[in-house]
Image (spheres, grey):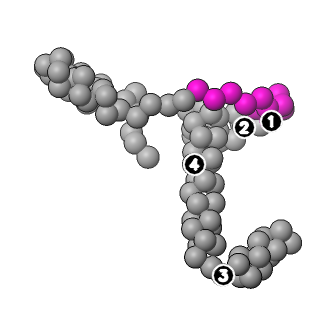
Amino acid sequence: MKTQFSDLSKAEQEKIEREYHQMNPAEFDDLMSQAETDTTASIRLPGKLVETLKVVAKLEGERGYQSMVRKWITERLQQEARLALRLSKMPLKEVVAVLEGQLTK
């Protein structure tokens, strides 16, 4: 996971800021055009679930529950992608057997 700017020491933050301020505008534009962008997504969750997520995030040392949920979703998607890749290389009968085994767990 990438280090958050706010997690860096004050000296490290100042060094990075100096580097950005010394860039010419074209270099800065190129760097910013390569930056990853996030898409805002909204999901409605029951209030009790959100409160529980906040408690778990605090216990796990996360900044907030949303970053923790984002991490959980990413981890689960990676698991599902690996499973889908393995299944795509199997004969159909084997895929059905694996999926039936997943459903009975």
Which of pointers 3 and 4 lies earlier in the amino acid sequence? 4
Residue that badge 3 annotates: 91
Secondary structure beneath disc 4? helix
- Given the image, on which type of amino acid does mark 1 rest? Leu
Mark nearest the camera among 1 and 3 is 3
Mark nearest the camera among 3 and 4 is 3
User: How far apart in space, not on screen, are marks 2 and 4 (Cα)?
Assistant: 16 Å
Which of pointers 1 and 3 lies earlier in the amino acid sequence? 1
Q: Is residue 47 above or below residue 24?
A: below
User: How far apart in space, not on screen, are marks 1 and 3 (Cα)?
Assistant: 40 Å
Secondary structure beneath disc 3? loop
Residue that badge 1 annotates: 49
Residue 76 point in image, percent of width and height:
63, 54
User: How far apart in space, not on screen, are marks 2 and 1 (Cα)?
Assistant: 6 Å
Q: Does the segment drawn in magenta span residue 46? A: yes
Taking the spot 61% from the left edge, 71% from the top edge, the residue there is 88
Secondary structure beneath disc 1? helix
- Given the image, on which type of amino acid does mark 3 rest? Pro
Q: Which residues are magenta?
A: 40-51
Residue that badge 4 annotates: 74
* Residue 37 badge: none
Q: Quadrant of residue 84?
A: bottom right
- Given the image, on which type of amino acid does mark 4 rest? Thr
Taking the spot 71% from the left edge, 78% from the top edge, the residue there is 92
Residues packed near mark 2 inside 10 Å, few (<14), some (14 to 19) or many (20 plus): some
- Given the image, on which type of amino acid does mark 2 rest? Leu
Residues packed near mark 4 inside 10 Å, few (<14), some (14 to 19) or many (20 plus): few
